[in-house]
Structures are given as structure tokens and as C-alpha cells.
């Protein structure tokens, strides 16, 4: 590819105190928290709605927000408020009412206690409302394409709007793109994938309606002894049906079981089964390849469900994701890094900005058929330190959500949506404090931040 220099006069169209790029689970909570903290906030999102993977990617349910024994709800704050608001419009079921080993958890118990089924459509509207009430200015249809830094400050970002390119200045920025696009463009250090640069596989989610859930339950009950179990715990469902289809030549995929998660409506399921290997979610061409392969797999899986799984005979395919589900891309290097050892030894550092108990979940670690899934000890949790959100090169940039500073396995635990929302709330709160007080994010008073987070309903003591 040859290079050319493109010059243009890009107007400094917009200014804000805080700019959040990306309105996924992390960005939504970051923007709301920063605005409630008193900052003037602009949220920039390339899609036409918020929610990221939860809406565009059709990923559901919200994975557990409880401790690993399922006794205490750990992730609260704005996440809990969002769930309550979704429930009020019939768009979610409270996690306390959702048991593991049921249709809501793909009949798995391992690490799947008290998940939160929700409706993507309700989330889009509730997100708009929460942002509007907090006073956040939203720019949908706007994609970050570049960032500029002077010394230790990110000064502005370049975005592609419907009108063309524009620049946005702010006192501080929060990167919630899921991929660390803003931090990477500004020049922050990062790694990609695991030590070998290999990223977790991608999945095209889809939803199915018209399922007779009672019949699915009966098939599961009949095959309870057939269940793939590790350490006495249900781990995979419907692998007996997948084997049957494979023998009949109807299952060309590498997957050995089906991830099926009942939604808010009794006859609707989110299907988390397709797997596309070797996709780089930071590259358009690779993403395109993954989208096409993912949709092909959706067709195969849906045909399988109708033919082989009792209860799916009269089902209909509602929708596949409008974007491929990307589990892993960049991990931005922060002033602290969360490691899998810290997670598995249930460390709660003094500068934790949230607590979580989500399992380490690395798909495809040992090849296309495999999963690594390690739960943490019952009743325990771990803390996410403040510095994981802060790249050392910048005084006014925070990163929230999936790409925070974490090794590949640790990222495999905190990448699920409730922790991403908790991290987003902490980032928004911290950035508002820094902007209003004139502080450097690298040396922010974390004790004061923790006091503010506690006052806002965030659990910091287990
Ligand atoms: C296949 C799959 C299955 C999963 N299963 C579950 C599950 O069952 N439960 C669970 O809780 N979690 C699950 N997860 C994890 C979870 O969905 C994501 O890790 C989580 O959504 C990350 O949140 P985020 O806000 O960091 O990023 P995202 O959800 O990716 O949101 C990023 C947002 O930024 C926007 N954006 C990106 N780049 C730009 C740009 N350059 N300019 C402007 N906007 C931009 C995107 O449009 C998006 O709205 C799953 C993920 C995948 C991929």
C-alpha cells in the first residue's frame, strides 16, 4: 500500500470538558458518572444507539454481578440503577430471581449464578434517557479516527461525522471504545491479545423466538446424567444433540455444545455458539471476514436447533448481531496491571475502584474447540485497582471497559458487562473530579474517589 499525505482544514467544531468515546456498557456509565459529577460531558458513538455489544452485538445476559457463592450483589451503583430502570419497563429480570442451572444460564452452574436477562431494545431507550437526565450531550453516527497529544495531554480527537471530518477538544478524555482506539491513536502503549498476540475468538450472537422452553427443559432434565461435568459442576449443554447432528453430517462446526440463554420473554433465547477464529477486531478487512463467516455459522446453528433440539421445532430466527462479537483486542498499559494471579488469589488492593467475582473465561485458548473457564473460590471476589484505567503517558486520559490494563486471562474475567459498567462509573467519576479540581489523573486522590464511589452506591468492601 502506498502512502500519501492528506491535508485539510478541519474545524475545531466542538468543545467539552470531558469527552467519552464509545457508548457501550463502560461508556454509558462513564458518561453518566462524569456528568453527575458536575462535568460538561460529550459522548461520541459510531452507532446510532448506546449499548455496544449489549445492543449492536446482541450479547446477553449481563453476566453475574454477585460474589462467586451467589450470596451478595457486588456490582451495584449505576449498573444496578440501569437494571432497575430496565425492570420498570419490562426490559430485564432482577438477577436475584435468576437461578443457575436453568434456561437463563444455558443450564450451566459454573460461574453463572444470578445473571441478568435484558432486552436490547429497552436498553437503547433507557440509555438515551439516563444520558439525557444526566445532561450528557450525545453525538451518534460519529467515529473517532485519530487523536492528538501535546506533552502529557491528549488535546483533541478527530472524528468522522456525517458532515465530514471534525475535531473535538476537551480537558479530559475517556476511551470506552472497547478496543482502546483513542488511547492507541494518542500514542499510549498497549499489547494485543495474549503473549503471542493471539486474540480470543469472535462470535456472532443471534436471537431466536417461538421456542417451547418447557420442552427444552425436559430434554435437559432427561439428559442430566449426560451433561459434561467438571468437578461435579454442569459445564456444557446439548452436546448430546451436537454429537447426533455431527454423526448425521449436519454439524460441520468445531463447537461441541450450545450456549443458549433464555431472555426476558419465555420463548426467546440468545444463542452464543458460533466461533470465528483469528479475527483482528481492530481491522476492517478482518472484521468483514468475521461478519460473513459468523452469519454463515448462524444459519448452520439455527437449522441445527430446529432439527435436533426438542422445543425449537417451531422457532424463528429473530436477528443476528449488527456487529460481530469481539472478545479481545488491545490491552492498554496502565500505571497498574491486573493479573490473573491477583484475580485467582482474590486480592482486593487498597486502591480498588470496584469488586467483581467473574470467572476467568478465555475462549479458544487451546484451539478452536476449547475454553478455559476458572471460577474463583466460593464467596470470594477480587478488586480492580484504579491504575488499570490510567495510561502513564497522559495526565488527562482514562480507559474504561474491556481494554483496561490487564493480562490476557485477567481481561478474560473483567471483560463481561457488569464489571465493564463498574469500571466505567469509576472512570467517569475520577475524570470529573480531575477536571473540576485541576488534577492529574495519574496522581488523583484515590481515597477521595473511593469515598465518592461508595456514596454513589458502589460496593468497595465485600
Ligand atoms: C461473543 C461474546 C459473548 C459475550 N458474552 C457475554 C455475556 O454473556 N455476558 C456479559 O456480561 N458479557 C459478555 N461479553 C462481554 C461484553 O459484551 C463486552 O466485553 C463488553 O460489552 C465490553 O464493554 P465495553 O463498553 O468495554 O465495549 P463495547 O461493548 O464493545 O462498546 C464499545 C462502544 O464503542 C463504540 N466504538 C468503538 N470504536 C469506536 C470509535 N472508533 N469511534 C466511536 N465509537 C466507537 C462501539 O460502537 C460500542 O458502542 C461477551 C462478549 C462477546 C464478544
Image (tube, rainbow, N blue to C red):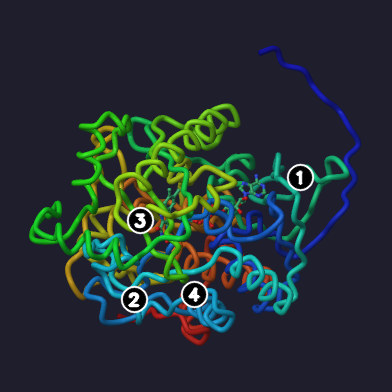
Label 3 neighbour load within 10 Å: few <14, some 14-19, many 20+: many
Instruction: Specify the farthest residue to the top.
Output: 2
Q: Secondary structure at mark 1?
A: strand
CB under 8 Å between callouts 2 and 4?
Answer: no
Residue under label 1, please give it: 159
Asked whether residue 141 is in view, the answer is yes
Residue under label 4, please give it: 92
Residue under label 2, please give it: 98
Quadrant the C terminus occupies: bottom left
From the image, state whether disc 2 or disc 1 is nearer to you.
2
Q: Is residue 132 above or below residue 366?
A: below
Q: Secondary structure at mark 2?
A: loop
Marked residue nearer the N-terminal end (4 or 3): 4
Residue drawn where x is 63% and y is 59% of the image: 23
Q: Could you tell me residue 383's position as x and y percent? A: 34, 68
Residue drawn where x is 33% and y is 35% of the image: 195
Q: Could you tell me residue 110's position as x and y percent? A: 21, 62
The foreground one among 366 and 332 is 366
From the image, state whether disc 4 or disc 3 is nearer to you.
3
From the image, state whether disc 3 or disc 2 is nearer to you.
3
CB under 8 Å between callouts 3 and 2?
Answer: no
From the image, state whether disc 1 or disc 4 is nearer to you.
4
Which of the labelled discs sits on residue 260, or is there none?
3
| Dot 4 beta carbon under 8 Å from ligand 1 | no
Instruction: Specify the farthest residue to the front.
Output: 314
Q: Could you tell me residue 118's position as x and y percent? A: 49, 69
Measure the C-alpha gap from mark 2 to mark 1. 41 Å
Image-based side of 266 in relation to 102, left or right: right
Quadrant the N terminus occupies: top right
Marked residue nearer the N-terminal end (1 or 3): 1
Amino acid at each position: 500500500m502506498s502512502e500519501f499525505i492528506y491535508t485539510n482544514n478541519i474545524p475545531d467544531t466542538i468543545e467539552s470538558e470531558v469527552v467519552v468515546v464509545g457508548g457501550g456498557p463502560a461508556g454509558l456509565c462513564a458518561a453518566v458518572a462524569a456528568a453527575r459529577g458536575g462535568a460538561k460531558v460529550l459522548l461520541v458513538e459510531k452507532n446510532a444507539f448506546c449499548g455496544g455489544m449489549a445492543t449492536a452485538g446482541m450479547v446477553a445476559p449481563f453476566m453475574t454481578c454477585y460474589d462467586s457463592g451467589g450470596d451478595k450483589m457486588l456490582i451495584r451503583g449505576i449498573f444496578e440503577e440501569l437494571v432497575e430502570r430496565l425492570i420498570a419497563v419490562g426490559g430485564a429480570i432482577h438477577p436475584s430471581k435468576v437461578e443457575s442451572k436453568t434456561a437463563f444460564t444455558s443450564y450451566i452452574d459454573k460461574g453463572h449464578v444470578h445473571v441478568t436477562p435484558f432486552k436490547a431494545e429497552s436498553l437503547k431507550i433507557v440509555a438515551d434517557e439516563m444520558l439525557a437526565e444526566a445532561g450528557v450531550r450525545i453525538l451518534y453516527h460519529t467515529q473517532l479516527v485519530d487523536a492528538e497529544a501535546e506533552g502529557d495531554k491528549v488535546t483533541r480527537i478527530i472524528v468522522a461525522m456525517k458532515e465530514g471530518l471534525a475535531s473535538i477538544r476537551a480537558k479530559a478524555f475517556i476511551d470506552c471504545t472497547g478496543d482502546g482506539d483513542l488511547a492507541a491513536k494518542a500514542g499510549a502503549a498497549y499489547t494485543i491479545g495474549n503473549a503471542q498476540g493471539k486474540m480470543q475468538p469472535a462470535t456472532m450472537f443471534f436471537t431466536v423466538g417461538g421456542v417451547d422452553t418447557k420442552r427444552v427443559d425436559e430434554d435437559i432434565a432427561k439428559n442430566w446424567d449426560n451433561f459434561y461435568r467438571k468437578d461435579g459442576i454442569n459445564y456444557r449443554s446439548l452436546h448430546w444433540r451436537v454429537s447426533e447432528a455431527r454423526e448425521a453430517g449436519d454439524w460441520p462446526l468445531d463447537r461441541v455444545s450450545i450456549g443458549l440463554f433464555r431472555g426476558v420473554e419465555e420463548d426467546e433465547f440468545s444463542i452464543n455458539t458460533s466461533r470465528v477464529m483469528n479475527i483482528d477486531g481492530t481491522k476492517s478487512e478482518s472484521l468483514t471476514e468475521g461478519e460473513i463467516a459468523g452469519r454463515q455459522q448462524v444459519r448452520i446453528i439455527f437449522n441445527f436447533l430446529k432439527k435436533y433440539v426438542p422445543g425449537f421445532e417451531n422457532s424463528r430466527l429473530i436477528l443476528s448481531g449488527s456487529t460481530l462479537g469481539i472478545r479481545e483486542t488491545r490491552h492498554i498499559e496502565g500505571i497498574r496491571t491486573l493479573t490473573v494471579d491477583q484475580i485467582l488469589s482474590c486480592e482486593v488492593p487498597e486502591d480498588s475502584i470496584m469488586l467483581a467475582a467473574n470467572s476467568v473465561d478465555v475462549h479458544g485458548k487451546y484451539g478452536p474447540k476449547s475454553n478455559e473457564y476458572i471460577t474463583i473460590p466460593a464467596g470470594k471476589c477480587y478488586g480492580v485497582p484504579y491504575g488499570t484505567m490510567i495510561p502513564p503517558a497522559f495526565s488527562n486520559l482514562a480507559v474504561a471497559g474491556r481494554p483496561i490494563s490487564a493480562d490476557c486471562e485477567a481481561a478474560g474475567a473483567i471483560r463481561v458487562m457488569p464489571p465493564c459498567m463498574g469500571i466505567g462509573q469509576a472512570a467517569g467519576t475520577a475524570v470529573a473530579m480531575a477536571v473540576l479540581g485541576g488534577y492529574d489523573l495519574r496522581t488523583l486522590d484515590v481515597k477521595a474517589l473511593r469515598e465518592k464511589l461508595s456514596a454513589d452506591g458502589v460496593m468497595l468492601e465485600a
